[in-house]
Image: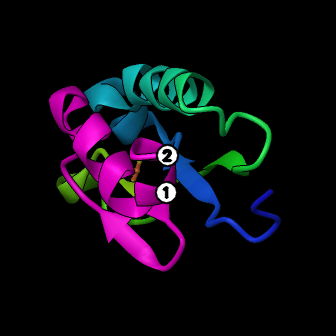
Amino acid sequence: MNAQTKPITVCMGSSCYARGNANNVELIQTWLRIHGMGDSVELGGTLCEGRCCEGPVVRIGQTVYTKVAPASVGDILEHEFPEAAHG
Ligand code: FES
């Protein structure tokens, strides 16, 4: 098992939440479950990251993704967790 996978932090500040992260967090949870990573990836929320005009903001490990559209969630997760996407 991957004990050291990158954590995912979703900005749940009011701007990001309203601009799409309410939906994105559900898409992320579903993707992780489908790919068998629901228990190995730490998924959390954060308050406003001070980048509202670039939102919705999602952080995966050290990488900050901005303007995350629902349609791009799958591509981002496949890029970040290729072992799950292709495993
Ligand atoms: S609400 Fe997400 S950066 Fe401000």
Residue topped by disc 2: 87
Front residue of 45 and 51: 45
Q: Is residue 78 left or right of residue 14?
A: left
Front residue of 2 and 17: 2
Within 10 angstroms of label 1, few (less than 14), some, or many (20 or more) residues? few
Q: Is residue 60 magenta?
A: yes
**Residue 87 image position (x, y, % from top left):** 49, 46
Front residue of 31 and 10: 31
Image: 67 above or below 7: above
**Residue 21 image position (x, y, % from top left):** 40, 32
Helix, strand or loop for disc 2: loop
Q: Residue lying furthest front in this view? A: 87
Q: Is residue 18 left or right of residue 66?
A: right
The residue shown at (70%, 34%) is: 38
How many callouts does the rendering have? 2
Image: 18 above or below 5: above
Residue topped by disc 1: 83
Q: Residue lying furthest bottom in this view? A: 62
Residue contact at pointers 1 and 2, CB within 8 angstroms: yes
Q: Is residue 42 left or right of residue 86?
A: right
Front residue of 20 and 52: 20
Region of the chain picked out in magenta, as a range: 59-87
The residue shown at (73%, 51%) is: 42
**Residue 28 image position (x, y, % from top left):** 48, 32
